[in-house]
Amino acid sequence: MGGSDNKVIGTDCGPIGIAICSDSEFPEQVCHLVDQGAMILSGPVCTDDRNGYLRGRYCCAARAIENQIYVTMSGVCANLPNVGNMDVHYVQGAVLTPCDLPLPGTGYRRRPNRTRRR
């Protein structure tokens, strides 16, 4: 399915943008998504070796820092031996945060309680 639009998708977790594989290497595309209101970037990748994975990982980390957003990175987790170029994969999933907003040791951030207890 093709197209020429690059739009933000509204979800229960907030507006997300998607930069598939090498799209995360282009700062302008992610900046465009953030200008549209994206708070989270999803960066699915399909890499077959460590060098390709690291290129995607570093680019996703750079987009998180540049735009002060969270970036999730995921990859292909199975091999398709009878499909060309899909027989070997190398990837590690990641949730990347802006440099001044690290996740706490629990791995998640609690939402502030709006009702104040006395």
Image: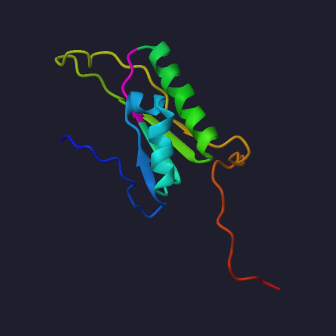
Please report the residue visible at 74 percent of the width from the left and 45 percent of the height from the top: 100
Quadrant of residue 58 in the image?
top right
Magenta span covers which residues?
A: 44-48
Q: Which of 38 and 97 is in front in this view?
A: 38
Q: Which of 34 and 82 is in front in this view?
A: 34
- Image spot of residue 59 (x, y percent): 53, 28
Quadrant of residue 109 in the image?
bottom right
Please report the residue visible at 48 percent of the width from the left and 41 percent of the height from the top: 30
- Image quadrant for the C terminus? bottom right
Please report the residue visible at 57 percent of the width from the left and 46 percent of the height from the top: 70
Left or right: 57 in relation to 5 = right
Q: Which of 100 and 67 is in front in this view?
A: 67
- Tell whether position 57 is magenta: no
- For residue 49, above or below residue 78: above
- Image spot of residue 62 (x, y percent): 59, 33
Quadrant of residue 102 in the image?
top right
Left or right: 115 in relation to 40 = right
- For residue 10, above or below residue 31: below
Does the magenta stretch mainly form a helix, a strand or a loop?
loop
- Tell whether position 47 is magenta: yes
- Image spot of residue 107 (x, y percent): 64, 48
Please report the residue visible at 45 percent of the width from the left and 17 percent of the height from the top: 52
Q: Which residue lies furthest to the bottom in this view?
A: 118
- Image spot of residue 61 (x, y percent): 59, 33
- Image quadrant for the N terminus? top left
Numbered marks: total:
0
